[in-house]
């Protein structure tokens, strides 16, 4: 997720909402613009997204371990910044076969990826994210992609993919 300009990131609800699929074919659907291929690319790299307080607690709850043990085993803490450790160039929770092994306890920024709202106002972000994520629908014009994403965001708030 490196190299993406998220400075125009709008205020986000503290609790992301799960998008509901509609049966009405006239209603924009998440699958119109994105279907995860489970390629795992977004879990690669030497750093990860950061975890806010709610992320930390959700992960602790999901793992069912004492907080100190989770911190010791899985987190990279730098000052006030908490990230996940990386192993062999990917997030410590990524498994080639299983994918994300902490799925329900993953940070909200992982769940939001790749549909970052900054793509609406910055075509370069859209192009950069699209180039790194094969799950984004290929045969849509940028304007149409934005129209659907905007509609989904207005209806659901933060999209969790
Ligand atoms: S979100 Fe995109 S980059 Fe990440 S696993 Fe899915 S398709 Fe791959
Ligand atoms: S928490 Fe899961 S989704 Fe997020 S980077 Fe790690 S393996 Fe990937």
Image: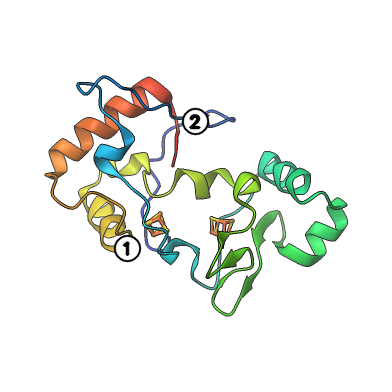
Name which residue lies at 66% across and 46% down: 105
| Ligand 2 contact, mark 2 (Cβ < 8 Å) | no
Lower sequence index among marks 1 and 2: 2
Horizontal relation, residue 46 to residue 27: left or right: right
| Ligand 1 contact, mark 1 (Cβ < 8 Å) | yes
Q: Position of residue 93 (x, y in %)?
A: 63, 63
Q: Position of residue 6 (x, y in %)?
A: 40, 48
In this view, 39 is above or below 30: below
Report the quarter where the N terminus lies. Answer: bottom left
In this view of the protein, which residue sits in the foreground, 35 or 71?
Answer: 35
Which residue in the protein does label 1 denote? 132
Horizontal relation, residue 12 to residue 68: left or right: left
Would residue 114 be seen by someone viewing this image from the given angle?
yes
Q: SS for tag 1?
A: helix
Q: SS for tag 2?
A: strand
Q: Which mark is residue 18?
A: 2
- How many neighbours does mark 2 have within 10 angstroms: few (below 14), some (14-19), or many (20 or more)? few
Q: Position of residue 4 (x, y in %)?
A: 37, 57
- The CA span between labels 1 and 2 is 24 Å
In this view of the protein, which residue sits in the foreground, 40 or 48?
Answer: 40
Name which residue lies at 36% across and 44% down: 115
Name which residue lies at 40% across and 46% down: 7
Horizontal relation, residue 134 to residue 61: left or right: left
């Amino acid at each position: 997720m490196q190299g993406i300009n998220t400075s125009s990131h709008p205020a986000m609800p503290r609790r992301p909402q799960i998008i509901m699929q509609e049966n009405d074919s006239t209603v924009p659907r998440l699958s119109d613009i994105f279907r995860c291929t489970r390629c795992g690319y977004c879990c690669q790299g030497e750093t990860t997204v950061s975890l806010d307080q709610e992320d930390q607690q959700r992960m602790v709850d999901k793992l069912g371990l004492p907080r100190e043990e989770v911190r010791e085993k899985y987190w990279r803490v730098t000052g006030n910044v908490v990230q996940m450790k990386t192993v062999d160039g990917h997030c410590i929770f990524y498994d080639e076969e299983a994918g994300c092994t902490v799925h329900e306890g993953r940070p909200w920024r992982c769940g939001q990826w790749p549909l970052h709202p900054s793509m609406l106002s910055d075509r370069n972000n859209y192009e950069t994210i699209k180039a790194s994520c094969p799950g984004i629908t290929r045969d849509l014009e940028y304007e149409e992609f934005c129209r659907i994403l905007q509609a989904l965001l207005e209806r659901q708030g933060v999209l969790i993919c």
